[in-house]
Image (cartoon, grey):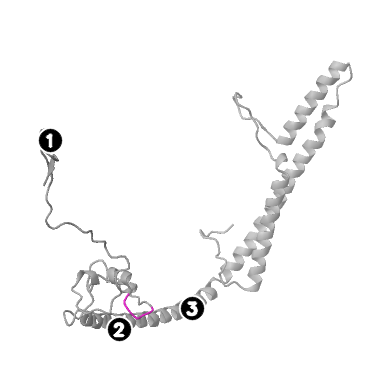
Amino acid sequence: MADYIVEPPRDLPLSTKVKALRKEYEDAKAKLSTYKQENARYRTRDVSQVGEVKARYSTPALEDAKADLKALEIQAVKEGKALPDKGKFLGAVKAKTEEYDRTVSALEFLVARARKAFDDGVKEELVPMGRKEAAKAAQARDAWEKAYKAAMAARETLEKHAGLFSYCVTAGGMDVHPRHGHSQGDRLECWELNEDGLLTWEASQELDYGQIPVKVSGLIESDPNPPVVEEFNDNPKPRYFIAKADGYGNNWEH
């Protein structure tokens, strides 16, 4: 069997020959699994019941046959007839159990042989495959470096223009965006304009433009849900209840 820990990945660039060996191995495994599932009643296992002290090994098929034979024996005795032939009755099931064991053994041998052929094929191609993958990794690394440098350049451009926007919106008050150098990130990925070209209200809040003195209007979208200011009396007069005798007017006075 294989001496490696991880199974060969599905995207390993195997040759056509080794791919065919893999298919033979997988087909052999599938055939073994299907046979076991379809004939599971003939697999020997511990069939002991609750209360039994020792393990008792048999097959579900044989246990069912024994139960059927017991019922026939009871019926025969009751009717005064001869007992059924035990050997003949259970023989077919025992023969099927033996056939199951022999078939599984043969299928397992075929699986092991196919696996060995596949493993040997993989080992023969590890060096050429490894060199190809090393070259592809080098190409990917170069592409990643190029993309990274482009991303960093775009990031610098974004910071530059965000700073110039801040200069405009604060009328020269600052030339960097509000979260410049923030320990929890500058959140510039939230930069978004509405259809009128204004910085959206949500973006302005994420970028902390609500925390700086914005002196120029027409650059940031207005709050779509402004806070409601409740009206109140600037000079309220409390009302007092004064107890008066009947006939002296209203008891409530300001």
Q: Residue at x 82, y 22 (%)?
A: 73
Magenta range: 195-199
Residue 162 position in % (x across, y down): 27, 80
Of the image marks 2 and 1, the number of the one nearer the N terminus: 2
Q: Quadrant of residue 27?
A: bottom right
Q: State whether residue 63 is above or below residue 218.
A: above
Q: Main secondary structure of the magenta part?
A: loop
Q: Please tell me whether mark 1 sits on a helix, a strand or a loop.
A: loop
Q: Please tell me whether mark 2 sits on a helix, a strand or a loop.
A: helix
Q: Quadrant of residue 204?
A: bottom left
Q: CA distance from mark 2 to mark 1?
A: 84 Å
Tell whether position 196 is magenta.
yes
Q: Please tell me whether mark 3 sits on a helix, a strand or a loop.
A: helix
The amino acid sitting under disc 3 is: Lys
Residue 87 position in % (x across, y down): 82, 29
Q: Nearer the viewer, mark 2 or mark 3?
A: 2
Marks 2 and 3 close (CB-CB < 8 Å): no
Relative placement, left or right, of 184 versus 104 is left
Question: Label 2 belongs to which residue?
Answer: 157
Q: Quadrant of residue 47?
A: top right
Question: Label 1 belongs to which residue?
Answer: 247
Q: Nearer the viewer, mark 2 or mark 1?
A: 1
Question: Label 3 belongs to which residue?
Answer: 136
